[in-house]
Amino acid sequence: MAQILAPSAQWQMRMTKSSTDASPLTSKMWSSVVLKQNKRLAVKSSAKFRVFALQSDNGTVNRVEQLLNLDVTPYTDKIIAEYIWIGGTGIDMRSKSRTISKPVKDASELPKWNYDGSSTGQAPGEDSEVILYPQAIFKDPFRGGNNILVICDAYTPAGEPIPTNKRHKAAQIFSDPKVAAQVPWFGIEQEYTLLQPNVNWPLGWPVGGYPGPQGPYYCGAGAEKSFGRDISDAHYKACLYAGINISGTNGEVMPGQWEFQVGPSVGIEGGDHIWCARYLLERITEQAGVVLSLDPKPIEGDWNGAGCHTNYSTLSMREEGGFEVIKKAILNLSLRHKEHISAYGEGNERRLTGKHETASIDQFSWGVANRGCSIRVGRDTEKEGKGYLEDRRPASNMDPYVVTGLLAETTILWEPTLEAEALAAQKISLKV
């Protein structure tokens, strides 16, 4: 992100009376270029929803579309809540639906639920019940009306967080009085790659071949430079509809790769919003017949990887004299470099090579306006003497609860010894 601005007052989604009049995700949001890759598919469209099906002359597709777009609001107060959670790999997303008797405005109004953890790699078959705790709600851009998406975390029946529940620890960190007093802001830049189905190759690339070298694709326009723009735009609008604090999007350096930014978000909200935005992207690519990849280095060779750069500031960093606080935070981050790297995503060693706008995974570094460093500080921050830092180490498949929580823990709660601090300051040429 170019800068971190003031966060919106809407820290949690609030259902409004007008939400029932808003239309769900429209059908004209992705390119016919995608459809050409599946010539066997016939596409029938309505004003609201698109259905992909094999050729049919009996009107089945139209009837399904009519039911998908059916507005049930005049006939019942009941709504559909889509409960969403993180699966056993720590990156896959699962969800299932349930009927709620009336519209709700807060996650605390929703009941807990359960699922079969043995089918997601999160529990043994002989004791498979895992409990879902609703934590945040968003408007549902697919169903519209008062229907909602529910971000949940997962617990054992005894109330213990299961190993893949990283939200629980992050919430504890952000509820610490010292952290809460610093009002930590996060701006997260989520990069992702769109792949052609069945061949595991980037969208727009010749199958088994390569496009021209990098250069014209970053923020580019044109059929030979931009692949998947309509998916990116559809996702942008879906996020805005849902109440996600999305702040922008752009095409990336590698063709077929895109980025969206979420933030500035306060505390635990950063993780909730990124996970919900990822879920929307999974659903949209599902409808478009395209595969979503969060692999940090999807194509080997002279091609950029995919990261999840995390912009971060505290109240003290944003106030006068904040640059000194930022330098102290950088010092702490240098001392815990290995701990952060180990928590910043799987396969990150293939991306953090010191090439393609990355720093070496083995060496901590920082600099002003230097995108080849572990931590980048902007020119405006240096000039104004206050602002934020950008952690460029997280991979695209990182868990935002882990990264945001760890940044707050290391820079606010953790205190190194004076000896370690002095040695580190000398090593990275940082005067604090």
Image: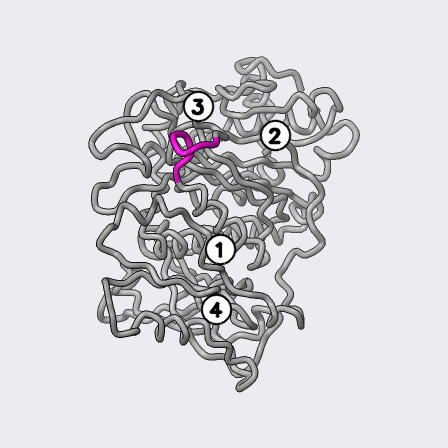
Quickly name the residue at label 1. Answer: 276
As helix, strand or loop, the secondary structure at mark 1 comes to helix
Give the quarter of the image for residue 426.
Answer: top right
> What amino acid is at disc 4?
Arg
Quickly name the residue at label 4. Answer: 143
Of callouts 3 and 4, the N-terminal one: 4
Give the quarter of the image for residue 302.
Answer: top left
The mark closer to the camera, 2 or 4, is 4
The mark closer to the camera, 2 or 3, is 3
Quickly name the residue at label 3. Answer: 216
The mark closer to the camera, 3 or 1, is 3
Of callouts 2 and 4, the N-terminal one: 4
The x, y position of residue 277, in whole percent, is: 49, 52
The mark closer to the camera, 1 or 2, is 1
31 or 244, nearer to the observer: 31
The magenta segment: 221-227
The x, y position of residue 368, in whole percent, is: 61, 18
Q: Where, quadrant-wise, is the C terminus in this rendering?
A: top right
Within the magenta stretch, is there residue 242? no
> What amino acid is at disc 1?
Cys
Of callouts 3 and 1, the N-terminal one: 3
In this rendering, is residue 282 above or below 318?
A: below
Of callouts 2 and 3, the N-terminal one: 3
367 or 425, nearer to the observer: 367
Of callouts 1 and 4, the N-terminal one: 4
Residue 339 visible in the snapshot? no
How far is disc 1 from disc 4 in space, using C-alphas? 15 Å
The mark closer to the camera, 3 or 4, is 3
Task: Return the mark for residue 389.
Answer: 2
How far is disc 2 from disc 3 in space, using C-alphas? 28 Å
